Image: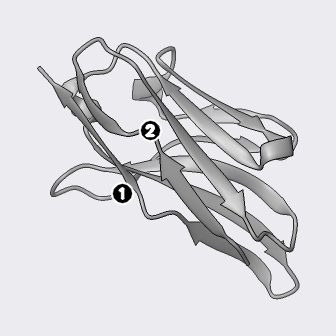
């Protein structure tokens, strides 16, 4: 049902910016939407932002006003623009695609891209 490849992570200072990309390939069914999650060391994976197929977006409260999720449907790619980064934004960022299959909703995850925000 396809794969996701994330890129754009790295090391940045507090207040800096990064843009993450997630490219979907090999998709054979439609998608309900794509999103970003993150996992900090020693913590559970948490939701960050998502964008549904109608274009509506949702954000984790702590990133509202700083992060923006967007997509390029022609490229099957979703982006996460992260501005005013804080040390607590550090973690591995994962992309997720929710696919509509005959068997029900299927979640496909990327391999993750690390983000480190230094103080």
Does residue 72 sit above or below 6 in this rendering?
A: above
Q: Residues within 10 Å of mark 1 (few under 14, many from 20)?
A: some
Q: Could you say where residue 68 lies in the image, as x and y percent from the top left?
A: 58, 24
Does residue 89 sit above or below 36 in this rendering?
A: above
Q: Residue at x 66, y 42 (%)?
A: 78
Q: In which quadrant is the C terminus drawn?
A: top left
Q: Residue at x 53, y 47 (%)?
A: 36
Q: Residue at x 76, y 68 (%)?
A: 99
Q: Could you say where residue 104 lies in the image, as x and y percent from the top left?
A: 79, 81
Q: Could you say where residue 92 lies in the image, as x and y percent from the top left?
A: 32, 50
Q: Secondary structure at mark 2?
A: loop
Residue 105 picture quarter: bottom right
Residue 101 picture quarter: bottom right
Indicate which disc residue 8 carries.
2
Q: Secondary structure at mark 1?
A: loop
- Viewer-closest of 24 and 43: 24
Does residue 93 sit above or below 12 in this rendering?
A: below
- Viewer-closest of 4 and 51: 4
Q: Residue at x 44, y 64 (%)?
A: 111
Does residue 20 sit above or below 28 in this rendering?
A: above
Mark 2 or mark 1, which is nearer the start of the sequence?
2
Q: Going by the picture, which residue comes out furthest to the left?
A: 119
In the picture of the structure, the residue carrying the numbered disc 1 is 45
Q: Is residue 119 left or right of residue 36?
A: left
Q: Nearer the viewer, mark 1 or mark 2?
A: 2
Q: In which quadrant is the N terminus drawn?
A: bottom right
Residue 115 picture quarter: top left
Q: CA distance from mark 1 to mark 2?
A: 19 Å
């Amino acid at each position: 049902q396809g794969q996701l490849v994330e890129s754009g992570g790295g090391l940045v200072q507090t207040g800096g910016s990064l843009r993450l990309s997630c490219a979907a390939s090999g998709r054979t069914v439609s998608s309900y939407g794509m999103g970003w999650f993150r996992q900090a060391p020693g913590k559970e994976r948490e939701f960050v932002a998502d964008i549904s197929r109608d274009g509506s977006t949702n954000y984790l409260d702590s990133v509202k006003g700083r992060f923006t999720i967007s997509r390029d449907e022609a490229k099957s790619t979703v982006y996460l623009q992260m501005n005013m980064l804080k040390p607590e934004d550090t973690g591995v960022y994962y992309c997720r695609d929710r696919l509509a299959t005959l068997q029900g909703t299927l979640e496909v995850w990327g391999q993750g891209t690390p983000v480190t925000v230094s103080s």
